Amino acid sequence: MPDSDDRPVRYATRDSDGFFEPPFPVDPVALTKQTRKTVCMKKDRVVYRKYTKFYAVGVYGGIATAYSVGCNLRCVFCWVDWSRDWPEEYGEFYSPSQVYSNLRNIMKVQALRRARVSGAEPTLCPDHLCGILALVNQDANEFDLFVIETNGVVLATEPDLASRLAQYASRRDRETVGHVRLSIRGGQRDAFEEKTGCAKEFLDLPFVAVERLWDAGVSFHVAVVVDSRFTSEQEKEATYSRLAEIDPSILRNVEEETLDPYPHALVRLRAVGREDIVGKEISGRERSVLRKRPRE
Ligand code: SF4
């Protein structure tokens, strides 16, 4: 997996024989380290993180959203804009208190009681994320819910993060308003690699993350990609069976995800040969996204 040399990792492509082209499949742990160098910054003992925007959307019944830059997976159906693949080109650094205050302003203007950190992978800079959560916790009466969305790689590889999150997102303490939404992209080795662009030996990471959240008493639910264009019934069953092994009650709150054909997803899917989904002709939406793609 040749991403350890710090060559930038953009989006997955396959050659005419259907094989991933280098550097894919990649190592998500190495990609975590590499991406952190670009999107996390420590200054005067405060950890800043890159974001591209702050806005409100209708999901979760209306929620203020901080859109973070950079991810440590390379899902082929990912809808996130080019900031995922060219994190050095996008976003500005914000401190936890700046993020918090931007979210609170949106909540006040739009009369919302929910907020989240979303975008690519919000846990890439754990101290920064916990800094935001500490501020949320201080004002918990202003929130019904604060959602942390994640793919679980950092939770699996950094064992203390789950217990840190439990302070702000606890299943047992009703005073906390945090809640983790953990996405599971694959339940079998080959399918995991095909969907995430990451090597199959890392399949277990999201399941380890579920175990850690469960053991630490974090309030969370799991989102599973069940879209039949990407996930077979057999793979879905394998995923559910692994979750049930951790605790059968986890299955009660699973969110089943189907995927929307957002423009960046179309470009990424075409690059791995999924013409069965995107069609033979390049659409106007794809062209428009391709025109904005940064140059190497
Ligand atoms: S779908 Fe989510 S986890 Fe996958 S690459 Fe995009 S932002 Fe990262």
Image: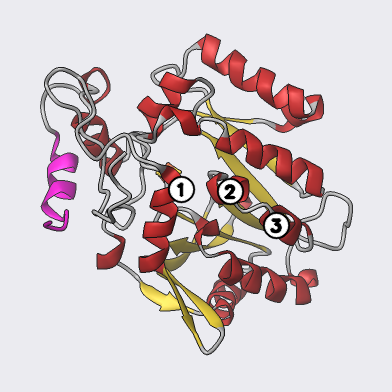
Q: Is residue 286 magenta?
A: yes
x, y percent for residue 39: 40, 67
Q: Residue at x 51, y 30 (%)?
A: 203
Task: Answer yes or no: is residue 123 visible.
Answer: yes
Residue stretch in magenta: 283-296
Residue annotated with mark 3: 160
The amino acid type, in three-letter code, at marker 3 is Asp
Is residue 235 depicted above or below 216 in this figure?
above
The amino acid type, in three-letter code, at marker 1 is Val
Quadrant housing residue 119: bottom left
Residue 165 placement, left or right of 98 = right
Q: Residue at x 56, y 85 (%)?
A: 45
x, y percent for residue 192: 44, 27
Q: Secondary structure at mark 2?
A: helix
Looking at the rendered image, the quarter that the N terminus falls into is top left
Is residue 80 depicted above or below 233 in this figure?
below
Upstream in the sequence, badge 2 or badge 1? 1
Q: Secondary structure at mark 3?
A: helix
Between 62 and 279, which is closer to the camera in this rendering?
A: 279
Q: Residues within 10 Å of mark 2 (few under 14, many from 20)?
A: some
Residue annotated with mark 2: 157
